[in-house]
Image: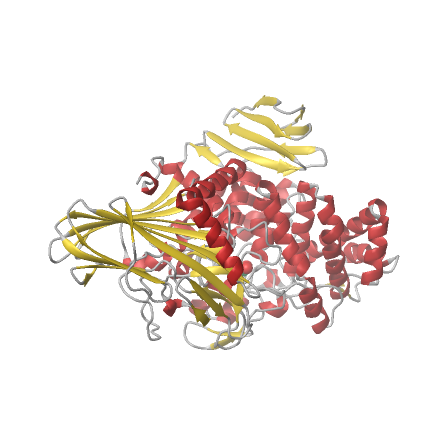
Amino acid sequence: MEVLLPPDDPAWRLDEPVYQPRYEAAAESRFSVSNGFLGVRGSREASRGPTWAAWLHNFSWSSWPRTFVAGLFDIPNFTPPVPALVPVADWMRVRIHLDGALLRLDHGTLLGHSRTLDYRRGLLLTDWRQRTVAGVVARVRTLRLVSQSDRAIGLQMLHFELESGAAAVTLEAAFDHSVSGLEAVRLDADMGLWRTEQTGQELAIACAADLARGGHDAPPGATAPLAWTWGWTGQAGGSATLRRMIGVARGASPQAAARAALDRAYGIGWRAVLDSHAAAWAQRWQAADVEITGDPAAQQALRFAVYHMTSAANPDDEHVSIGARALTGDGYLGHVFWDTESYLLPFYTVAWPAAARALLMYRYHSLDGARAKAAKLGWRGAMYAWESADTGAETTPDQVLDPLGRLVDVLTGKLEQHITADVSYAVWQYWQISGDAAFQRDAGAEILIETARFWASRALPGPDGLRHIRNVIGPDEFHEGVDDNAYTNRLAAWSLRRAVEAEAWLRQNWPDHAAALAARLQLSADESTVWAAAADAMAPGVTSASGILEQFEGYFALEDIDPTPFAARQGGIDMVLGHARVQGSQLLKQADVVALLGLLPDMLPPAAAKANFDYYAARCTHDSSLSRPMHALVAARLGETETALRFFREGAGTDLAATPEPAAAGGVRMATLGGLWQAAVFGFAGVSFNADGITLAPQLPPDWQTMTFRLHWQGRRVLVRLSQTGVQATLEHGDALTLRVGGAAVVLGGLGAVVAIPQTP
Ligand code: IFM
């Protein structure tokens, strides 16, 4: 059973050597497997018990099994009613009885345990040994995947051995329906059909299981729908292997598609399912790996990040996006935030352009939702939902309960409007880096135009002759209802200008498309001059004598509180200080002006950028997991390598800490992972893109001996290898381009061309 062996190289795996029930739900998040369509948390097949339970606010789950299907939302029975990603039946559940006693993870009898993510093959592997009270020793090894090459397919393997003693063994592989949020429509022996109660979506899972024992397939005993049972007399040294595969489909009448997926899996057999999945992962790693030598912790953080980002995306589905916790947990109900565009998109754009395109097409397809939101609030154009699910409609709850049970208003859905500029930014960045003219012509330009219309109506002229965006929340959510937030205003002005360019580009290159779009959107010939004028008149906000941009009007006058006592906390600072005190202080929840510097690095000269970074970093509590990686990126670009590395390591701890904080149970923090990647590639490696090629400005941390990665730019693929003493770049695909390093510009001409540029450390 060599397929069950974890990889030898510790840089290619994530290990959990000890079983800690208290942190199990958090571990299950980090050990999730996913392919952007299916996501399965890293819960054990055989847990300590069932997961039905009464509501208990003072217990945490020792296991929280979840399989999610991207885009499958329902409106559950909580208040306020907003869509949530629906968990489906747990198709991996296994019960093993030895002489009638249930084998379950139990410290008293556990002899050994490990859980390993095999990054390279995209597998979760577990291994546990247990001694029963009767003295029988059993070993159970498992493997699971959701296929990266055929996203509708899942495979589970479980290898059971009796190491000593003899026992009557029964093995039951049955769906656990108690964790599902769906209504069963029909359950047959090997097929289930469910539907969501409120949204009326259908889901089908076709499943088959077999058990190989002693070189033969053992027929299952009495079966119920989606349940298989085997029984035998086990002897020391004897073993059996369960293989269960599923085919999954959602949509109208999905049974045939689910059945077809399962048939494809059985048609090629479990081994080929595993091999083609591993081959697809190998391709993804080839394109997206970031290899670091000299710093194993940084290597681990980046592999973990690339693993989960690769797992989260589905380039074949333009109607789903990536929620804040992807398909790894219930956190934020599967909702999509600016996290996707501002933190994750750069990775996909550079490493997996097809995935980036699909994610942006989700925003294109949800333009109607964004138009409806703008119209509802009295603005023109398209205003994206702060939280969105499947349709693009606003799904932010209006109120939630705080940890003390008090109902608090959630204003982000109405006031956190910068997301509309974040989407435009991602569209533009994708277009510039990919050169995907068809996307820009058919979708990107329309997003830019409609969002520009929103900003032109939203930024209202004041008596000072400037345009003001009043009553918003910037990325720093501690301050609500502020005027002229620097991040929002400047990014809005930036996106207005890009819309002017996009509209002109369309007219010049695709006049027929431009005319059709103008007719459809009722775009007047001179509307872009309004956008340009609005951008030029956008209130720039106050800049202090020392060059600090005021985060919003009146910020400088607020109480200056030292954030140090709060920086180690995750959440709940306003519980300690009180909401009003936090609002009245300069304390920041997360990067705001610093995030603006992250997105627009050339906005300020380096000395001013550094002054702003220092000022705001000194006031930031990092109460949001998005914050530290963004600080790492900006510090790295500023050449503050030690500070950047500190933020990078702290950010990496968000999901990899030995003692995870409670929110980790809700899924991995995807934005953090995207931010870490950006800190490494855009920060330490100093990658940026120009009209004719790529610029590298590496400032590697001293321990990073080498950093190797690939960049996709306008149809080219370039392999970059940085060391402390130089840069080497190889053109692996596409036409010549210019590479800039330091003051030097060299042409990387022709396929296979290699340039080496020495650098003084
Ligand atoms: O989008 C973020 C926001 O910036 C801070 N609170 C959590 C959200 C989801 O990650």
Placement of 691 over or under 213, stated as above or below: above
Q: How is the image coloured?
A: secondary structure
Residue 75: x and y in percent read: 52, 73
Query: In front: 211, or 717?
Result: 211
Q: Which quadrant: the N terminus?
A: top left
Residue 55: x and y in percent read: 35, 75
Residue 573: x and y in percent read: 45, 64
Query: In front: 535, or 752?
Result: 752
Residue 313: x and y in percent read: 54, 51
In-image side of 476 versus 701 (left or right): right
Please tell me in which quadrant of the rendered image residue 354 appears: top right
In-image side of 344 versus 229 (left or right): right
Give the residue displayed 59% in from the left and 26% down from the top: 730
Give the residue displayed 62% in from the left and 51% down from the top: 358
In-image side of 241 versus 369 (left or right): left
Query: In front: 326, or 73?
Result: 73
Give the residue displayed 79% in from the left and 54% down from the top: 536
Q: How many marks?
A: 0
Residue projecting furthest to the right: 525
